[in-house]
Image (cartoon, rainbow, N blue to C red):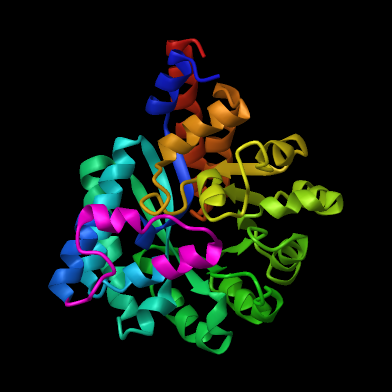
Amino acid sequence: MLTPQLDQFIRRMPKVELHLHLEGTVSPRTLIELARRNGVPLAATSEAGVAALFNYRSFGEFLSVFMGLARAIVYGEDFERLAYELGLELGQQQVRYAEVMISPMQHINRGVDLREAIEGAMAGFARAEREAGVTVRLALDYGRGYGTEAAWQVLEVARATRELGVVGWSIGGNEIGHPPEPFAPIFAAARAAGLGLMAHAGEVVGPASVWGAIEALGATRLGHGIRSVDDPGLLVALRERGVVLDVCPTSNLLTGAVGSWQEHPLPRLKAAGVALTINSDDPTFFHTTLTEEYRRAAIHFGFGADELSTAVLTAAAASFLPHAARTALCTRLAAELSALRAELAV
């Protein structure tokens, strides 16, 4: 139950977000302005028209809209603007740390310079950090549908931009027909380069996708992972290995991965002792925010201050920050959460 005290706690509590796509945070207004400036035609030319595109009957429809609208993002300054606007928004939600994904291949295939995109994004995040106090790092989320060969080129850019703030490597895109196992050598190289490993898995494909991500790829975090609930042995493995599921509840409903709030596997995953975080995925595309996802977890799953605080601390501990910075973040968040809970008596 979302009491007034719990609602205030959710609004004010320090947060961490680990599953967030930069392209999916662009506001309709910014998208239209970028499209006009860059000469990119869109399926809609008004803010209301763009917003009307954010209705999907399947995960495939969502991907089509996502990729179509992302064409408007072309230059480093575009990525800088998106990152700056996102950083300010995260700061307003009391987010202390976030790891944000860029989907490289859809940009590379349009002739976008990936390093320029990364430099632009990190410049925007640095500016937002100075103004709003939120720290943001990047992960490259390689689209599995592009095959393995092109991934090596993207990984080289990731290696070369670690000093700029690239901390993670992931695969995303449509799981159907694109299992994780062929990407094992690339993930091994990413691990050797010092990048944290995560993968979209178990969103629209069942446990086999999750097993592949944790065994063949060695991913320590999974985007979504909700279909793990279909395999009791997998739940044991996730719990014992400490693999973290970055769950995005509203996203799962709007892409059709889950039929209703009542059917969402998150409560069963939690009951099985699997480590979970709560995230917004693509907030513009799914009409949500991280704060709203926390509210919905309270309303639909019965999460209280204990469960929400645990989700924040789990996210901090699962981040791809260096050990000392990760420890400092966990310590800071624990102190802030404790003080706020004492103040609000929740």
Q: Residue furthest left?
A: 37
Look at 58% across and 47% down and name the residue there. Answer: 247
Locate residue 72 relative to residue 293 in the image: left or right. left
In depth, the one of 146 and 53 nearer the eye is 53
Give the position of the N terminus as an image quadrant.
top right
Q: Position of residue 194 (x, y in %)?
A: 54, 68
Q: Picture coordinates of residue 172 (x, y %)?
A: 54, 68
Q: Is residue 58 magenta?
A: yes
- The answer to which of 45 and 90 lies nearer the viewer is 45
Residue 148, relative to residue 51: is it above or below?
A: below
Q: Which residue appears farthest toward the bottom when viewing the image?
A: 149
Q: Of residues 175 and 149, which is closer to you in this image?
A: 175
State the residue at coordinates (43%, 14%): 4
Query: In terms of image quadrants, where is residue 162?
Result: bottom left
Asked if residue 160 can be seen in this view, the reply is no
User: Which residues are the magenta region?
Assistant: 39-65
Q: Position of residue 60 (x, y in %)?
A: 53, 67
Where 41 falls versus 111 (above or below)? above
